[in-house]
Image (cartoon, rainbow, N blue to C red):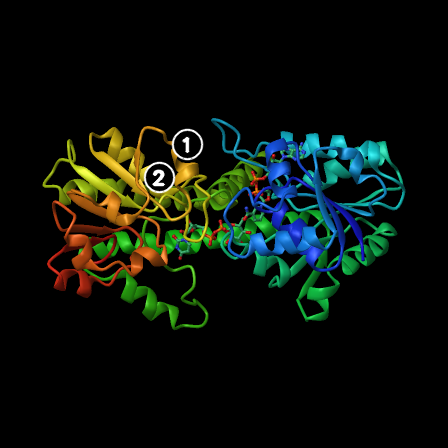
Amino acid sequence: MTRMTVIGCGYLGAVHAACMAQSGHDVVGIDVDRPKVESLASGRPPFFEPGFETVLADAIASGRLRFTTDFAAAHGNQVHFVCVGTPQRAGENAADMTYVDAAVNALTPHLSPGDLVVGKSTVPVGTAGRLAGILRAAEPGAMLAWNPEFLREGFAVQDTLAPDRLVYGLPAAPADAAAKALLDEVYALPLSAGTPLVTTDYATAELVKVAANSFLATKISFINAMAEVCEATGADVSQLADAIGYDARIGRRFLNAGLGFGGGCLPKDIRAFMARAGELGADQALAFLREIDSINLRRRVRMVDLAREVCNGSIVGRRIAVLGAAFKPNSDDIRDSPALDVATQLQLQGATVVVTDPEAVTNARRASPGLHYADTAMEAAQDADLVMVLTEWDDYRSLDPDELASVVAGKHMLDGRNTLDPVRWRAAGWTYRALGRP
Ligand SMILES: NC(=O)c1ccc[n+]([C@@H]2O[C@H](COP(=O)([O-])OP(=O)(O)OC[C@H]3O[C@@H](n4cnc5c(N)ncnc54)[C@H](O)[C@@H]3O)[C@@H](O)[C@H]2O)c1
Ligand SMILES: O=c1ccn([C@@H]2O[C@H](COP(=O)(O)OP(=O)(O)O[C@H]3O[C@H](CO)[C@@H](O)[C@H](O)[C@H]3O)[C@@H](O)[C@H]2O)c(=O)[nH]1
């Protein structure tokens, strides 16, 4: 059992804290957001993540997990995870490091010799080296490791309890052995289950994270570029993805064409990576990421154009139902959500847009109060001239075309995620259009 602190209790940190407690460790979660801390402390997740509520409740009931806003609670713990946000800086590509710096500065007065600070936030390469200097000045006996996190929202609990790999960016010898021993104790369960472990230096560990997200973004934009060509030729990008995906060297995962990637990670991480490469004089190496970003953003514009095409050239005054607000299914996260972005553009261009989502309406309403909202797909589709599926929730995949037809004004379906069966919808008398499919 390790006594640990988790600083920053958002989508990453709260799940990490609860899963660490579930794994037998003694955990205190620290966050500056008092309502969030109060919600977590009372066992109420401040966001939707499948399975999290149970893990949180069990961990609190076990007495091994508590939450506070007081950094003094870190005193006496051996390991301190830093999980605060690193969002895109306003008007720039670079990451905003103020939260990481503030967290480390608030932590240092409570450190003791032998403590290990573990960075989990996604950061520009070179951050760990810089933070190690700050720590050394404050508590020479403390150590720093970089341990990037690869969890996916929607699967955060399972990815935390059973990660597909662990990466330790360790300090230089002789501190490396003690740091590794503490991390091995923290991750004893996944390690004993055979989880692959890569031990390396700070810079490599930091780069593994942004390289992984850049690769994933590239895979998505690659298939979306193919979708653009498919549209120009009348070919079908879903069949193309299936066919190339059978090649084990390529693989079918992350080849779902559609509205492209959003969320609190891929878009801002590839931009921050480009910005950091620029600072390092390596901007040419990552020039391709600019194109990955452009292909991705182009999908949103194309989606709005397609809506206009379906509405005979104008969406002004048209009623459009948008099914989906979250950036992906099984999440309430609307950060850089392609669905919400498209809904906003449609509304700005004169349509009346009614948005629904199984979990994200509260967040969407807060971020985009100018849109209209409904609790269900049937409600959103009432009198709609056009229905658009922009987040591929199972609820929408299983919609009955005949039932939906009974409430709409026009039977026009735009599938922004290639998630519906065109044959079924067309057989029920709907016009069905999708990105990259005839
Ligand atoms: N969300 C994911 O799926 C995921 C996965 C892997 C890595 N990451 C990375 O993890 C980091 C956190 O992401 P997130 O999605 O959890 O963000 P988030 O915005 O959901 O959570 C960040 C939390 O940090 C808190 N915070 C800010 N400043 C603080 C301070 N000085 N002291 C204590 N708490 C503070 C905020 O109040 C918030 O609760 C980012 O670097 C992100 O790129 C996220
Ligand atoms: O074939 C696909 C797969 C995904 N997406 C979109 O890509 C975005 C990101 O999806 P996903 O990667 O599943 O979600 P995240 O939870 O943002 O997870 C990514 O970002 C995290 C934060 O860095 C990492 O930890 C994860 O490993 C990485 O997958 C979403 O908008 C998806 O709709 C597609 O358009 N097509």
Tell me the distance, in whole angstroms, between the alpha carbons under discs 2 and 1: 9 Å
Determine crowd level at label 2: few under 14, some 14-19, many 20+ residues with C-alpha closer than 10 A.
Answer: many
Task: Residue 265 in the image: state x and y as whole percent.
Answer: 51, 44
Q: Is residue 347 visible?
A: yes
Residue 204 visible in the picture? no
Amino acid of disc 1: Ala
Q: 398 left or right of 37?
A: left
Q: Is residue 187 above or below residue 282?
A: below
Quadrant in which ligand 1 is drawn: top right
Disc 2 + disc 1, Cβ < 8 Å = yes
Q: Is mark 1 within 8 Å of ligand 1?
A: no
Q: Residue at x 52, y 54 (%)?
A: 152
Secondary structure under tag 2 reads helix
Among numbered discs 2 and 1, the one appearing first in the sequence: 2
Placement of the N terminus among the 4 image quadrants:
bottom right
Most extreme residue toward the top, as rendered? 91
Q: For the residue marked with disc 2, what is the amino acid?
A: Leu
Q: Which residue is mark 2?
A: 340
In the rendering, at what x and y percent does residue 260 appear?
37, 49
Using the rendered view, name the quadrant where residue 438 is placed.
bottom left
* In the image: residue 352, left or right of residue 260: left
Instruction: Residue 111: give x, y in percent of width and height.
Output: 84, 38
Q: Is mark 2 within 8 Å of ligand 2?
A: no
106 and 60: which is toward the camera: 60
Please, is residue 348 above or below residue 30 in the view?
above
> Could you say which is closer to the camera, residue 62 or residue 127?
62
Q: Which mark is residue 367?
A: 1
Q: Quadrant of residue 126?
A: top right
**Which mark identifies residue 11?**
none
